[in-house]
Amino acid sequence: MGLNMNKKSFIPAIIIVVFCGLLSYANSFNNDFVWDDDFLITSNEVIKDVANWHGAVTQELLNGTHTNYYRPIQVFSYMLDYRIFGFNPFGYHLHSFLLHILNAILVYILTVYLCALLLKERNTESKNNKTLKRLNFIALFTAVLFVVHPAHCESVSYISGRADLLSAFFILSALLFYIRHFDLFKFSRILYLSSILLFVFSLFSKEMSLIFVPVLIIFEVFLKKDRVSGVKRLLPFIFIAAFYIVLRLTILNFSAQPIFAKASLYSPNSIIRIFSFFKGVIIYLWLLIMPVNLHMERYMMPAVRIFDAHVLTFISIAIILIVFFSRCRFRNKKFFIFNITWFFILLFPQSSFFFIAILADHYLYLPSIGIFMIIAYGLNKLYLRRKYLAQALFISIVVFFGLLTFSQNYVWRNSISFYRWTDKFSPASYITRNNLANIYAHLGMEEDAIKMYERALEINPKIESIAKNKSIVEDNYIKRYKDIIKSKPKSAVHYYNLARLYERKGMEEDAIKMYEQAISINPELVRAINNLGSIYEKNNRFDDALAQYEKAASIDPGFAKAFFNIGVVLANQGKLREAKGYFEKALEIDPDYQKAEESLGRVIWMIKASSAP
């Protein structure tokens, strides 16, 4: 290949990469264990003793869950962390960060060699320093983009995302050794065998490492002309991949059902899968360009027709690129095609073609390199024409992405910050709400826990474990309030809160007694009076309910809910014009009272309908 790394450019470049990475992730080291970290680390007996190594080798990653993840090297990495740091999350985050930095350095080195081949700068030693500077600029910007990009937080700041880091490290190292074995003749065999060994390690880090074989194939197709020798070089990798697949389908298959029986993965409708793949690609490309509001539990509606905006966008871009590359002749066409192919091949196994509705930021960890190389190439072209503009753009992009990453690390600060953020963007995830409720319950925040359990049950009322957890928290909360009332028997607020708990559990008679007790202590506690009226209304005791609502309204004329409730009772009794007045009064007090506005509209319509001839 005739290309040797220049120490004068290599060392400063690595310092820049490390510095940018450190600034972006400086606030992540004190983050706590989050989400699956509990299963993989804090509750994982296997990692606590090196003697348990056989468990890591013979069991799935989440033992007993039938998720069918087999990643022994990930478990070994946690064993090492536990050996050194115990359960101090700082050490685990440091380990993940260092792996990310190593991967960024590998990206830099690989980009130099790949650009030398793809841009036909093979004999750089015989050329001036401009060529080396060009390669180093593209490599540096690619590596810096890689190290600071916010989409990678899901792999770096999330300790359980370690598999992405390990897999990438072994794949990038294996590819580097494979490339270098062509021109370091003295060490050619050692480098080639090392590449094979690193590929094996990558397979034991993450299943998607199988994609390394297609990566080698595109390398051979794009950059080598000797097809016969290329096939021979690829055979060991193909054999290992095939052997691994056989193992995973037989003795290392931990799935509770045959893999092809998973309807969520293999939709019978190929058209929907293809359209969903197109849609997913556009979403991923947008995340690389504008990585804001990143979150876990990311889902998308499958694309079921060609006129979906994302599908049309993908097809339009594809047509433009195909026409451009087929008709235009320019020197570096191979560079673009290689990197576009890199992106698609590395993304495809984890794409919406298989996982129809599922998207995840960490799926971009390796595919993003291809896009970053193209961006870096474009910026280098700009640098040759507008030096200061290119430098300003470079700094702006890096600062923008770095700040977003720094901000994203706060999402992973602890379980509460993580689940609150995730629930904000994934309101259909009952798992998120249930887990957040469990944390609230553990912290003694029973009120918040009960509310979150209720929100989880709104999404999926059939999950018995959530209903059971809610009931347990409510029982404990009731017991706690009873104990408080014993020590503070004159506290109306505590009787009121206990009444609300009884009401939530459907214990209405007990709730009525507690509301009455609260009102006897504080006759002006309008919330208790109003809630007592609500129980009467539910049980068709409309006169009693109306009396309570009117009492609440007379005590607090600014309590819009009391006027609204009076209107509801009157409307149910057929007294529409009177009800209309109370709804108007509620809206006068609170103009944003949506239920009152809707009820007023219905009552007006009913009055008009009843007046019509």
Image (tube, rainbow, N blue to C red):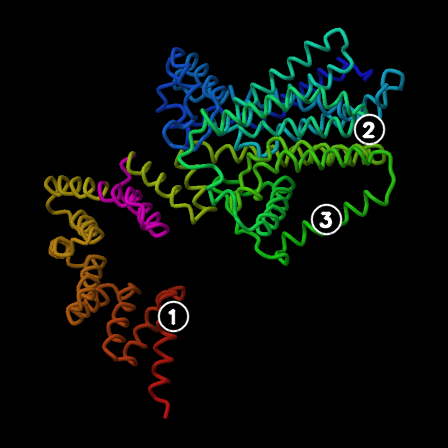
Quickly name the residue at label 3. Answer: 317
The CA span between labels 3 and 2 is 24 Å
Horizontal placement of 188 versus 453: left or right? right
Instruction: From the image, state whether disc 2 or disc 1 is nearer to you.
Output: 2
Counting from the top left corner in percent of width and height, residue 361 is at 55, 37
Label placed on residue 598? 1
Compare residues 265 and 48 and report the one nearer the observer.
265
* Residue 447 among magenta residues: yes
Residue lying furthest bottom in this view? 613
Looking at the picture, how far across and down is residue 328, in whole percent?
Answer: 86, 43
- Is residue 437 found left or right of 271 in the rendered image? left
Amino acid identity at mark 1: Glu
Looking at the rendered image, the quarter that the N terminus falls into is: top right
**Disc 2 versus disc 1: distance between alpha carbons?**
66 Å
Amino acid type of the residue tagged 3 in the rendering: Ile
Q: Residue 187: which numbered mark, if any? A: none
Between discs 3 and 1, the one toward the N terminus: 3
Query: Which residue sits at x=52%, y=33%?
Result: 154
Quarter of the figure with residue 139: top right
Determine the residue located farthest toward the top in the rendered image. Answer: 186
Q: Secondary structure at mark 2?
A: loop
Q: Earlier in the sequence, mark 2 or mark 1?
A: 2
Report which residue position mark 2 lands on: 119
Magenta region: which residues? 443-472
Q: Position of residue 578 (x, y in %)?
A: 27, 79
Q: Earlier in the sequence, mark 3 or mark 2?
A: 2
x and y percent of residue 224 in the render? 79, 25
Q: Is 393 left, or right, of 362 in this rendering?
A: right
Quarter of the image where one finds residue 372 = top right
Question: Going 59% across and 31% down the picture, which residue do you hit?
Answer: 365
Q: Please, what is the three-letter code of the amino acid marked with disc 2? A: Leu
